[in-house]
Amino acid sequence: MNQRDKSTKFDIIIIGGGAAGLMAAALLSESGKKVLVLEKMRQAGLKLRITGKGRCNLTNTFDQETFLSHCSNGTNYLKTAFLSFSNKDTIKTFESWGLPLVEERGSRVFPKSGKSLDVFLTLLSRIEKTNKVRLFCNKAVEQLLIENKQIKGVRCQDKEVFYADKVLLCCGGESYPATGSNGDGIRLAKLSNHKITPTMPALVGIRTKRAHPERLQNYTIRNVEVKILDKNDNILEKDFGDIYLDEYGLAGPTILRLNRKIAERLYKGEKLFVSVDMKPKLSKEQLRKEIVKVLQERMGQSVESVVRAWLPKELVEDYKHWLKRRKEEYKSLNQRVGNADFILEYLKSNKDEIIGDMGWHEAIVTKGGVDLTEVDCNSMQSKRVKGLFFSGEVLDFDGDTGGFNLQIAFSTAFLAAKSMCK
């Protein structure tokens, strides 16, 4: 073997320097294996550094059953990986690597510093402590080299070839494409004859038919009940929590959780509606009595003065914006509606048609990916190509907000790393 052959031969190649790839590399740094990490972007971990609005909710403290119930394919395909490296293992591992963590509201775990960058730097420092792991950036993989259903290596877009009998494909899904997660992993898996579950944006805001004033973009409305309805007003999903107004629709934690549950329905083109109840603790009858009383007490006063009884001044503008459109709609139907009915509807059953989602550039995760029936989820190895392993978002796993998706990346990376050392 000549010198160039030696420099391009590795025990393990990791495609993707994101959360899963960096975790796998960090775990493998003390294995004695010669490892190469190939990252297409000029820097590794770009998506990891911005996750959680720059704070990085890297896991949570839920028990096993609860955790898996928040993940697609959790109780069947994900269970082995989670048991191999649970949320408790993630906490213990990062703290043993020198990163203090803190548990916050909702059982969510963050770095004590409140900085995503520290999670990235912790993983990177583990990799850099050994000369066994090499990280190449600006190295996009174009093709997996496969012979007789056995992985042999990879060819990069610049035509450089690297060889290994074990390759871990973990270059993400299609969410946040600006960070490099643009579906390359899905493409490589498909080219290697793997079945792909259709992919779609998940944990993303929804676009609605009626917009909100641009000035109120990202305005938070707390403690509301949100329902997703079908065309016959049947409740498909509901959740409680905070939402954000958006110029084009709705976002925020509650909307993201609901979006994940209806992503497939949106993908199929079903006609869906969203209904927001700003006063969930009051029945319609109780709220109507309250509204009628206030209208009598403030007779002759402006709309702003009347609805300030229930709304902060910022939302008064949204109400007036909504009211103008709603009056026009009722007028076209030749229906007369009183002030009490308008206020009640806005506060209790503010319904709007969902016309789509905010798209890949805002989606937190990808729903869909490599079909799990083609992966041995006891090892993360492909059933089609020996030596090819998967971890992270490229697989058909996704979870709710709250640290589930990063934990999926860490758990599957651990299991893959462990299996590749055998």
Image: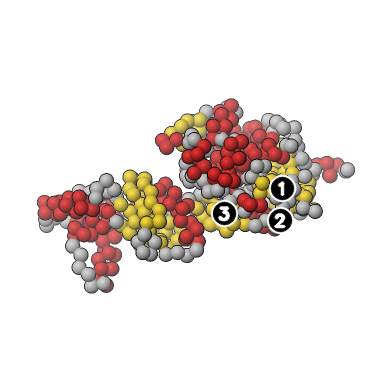
Name the secondary structure under disc 3.
Answer: strand
- In the figure, 347 relative to 109: above or below? below
Relative to residue 51, is residue 171 drawn left or right? Answer: right
Q: Distance between the residues labelled 2 and 3?
A: 17 Å
Q: Distance between the residues labelled 2 and 1?
A: 10 Å
Q: What residue type is labelled 2?
A: Ser
Q: Which amino acid does label 3 sit on?
A: Gly
Render colour scheme: secondary structure
User: Which image quadrant: the N terminus?
Assistant: top right
Q: Visible in this render: residue 62?
A: yes
| Mark 3 surroundings: few (<14), some (14-19) or many (≥20) residues within 10 A | many
Q: Which residue is drawn at 72% across and 40% down?
A: 420
- In the figure, 259 relative to 36: above or below? below
- N-terminal of the two: label 2 or label 3? 2
Q: Where is residue 385 in the image (x, y as percent from the top left)?
A: 73, 51
Q: Where is residue 223 in the image (x, y as percent from the top left)?
A: 33, 45
Question: Disc 1 vs disc 3: Cβ atoms closer than 8 Å?
Answer: no
Residue located beneath label 1 in the image: 388
Q: Visible in this render: residue 359?
A: no
Residue located beneath label 3 in the image: 368
- N-terminal of the two: label 1 or label 3? 3
Relative to residue 248, is residue 313 drawn left or right? Answer: left
Q: What residue type is labelled 1?
A: Leu
Residue 187 occupies quadrant:
bottom right
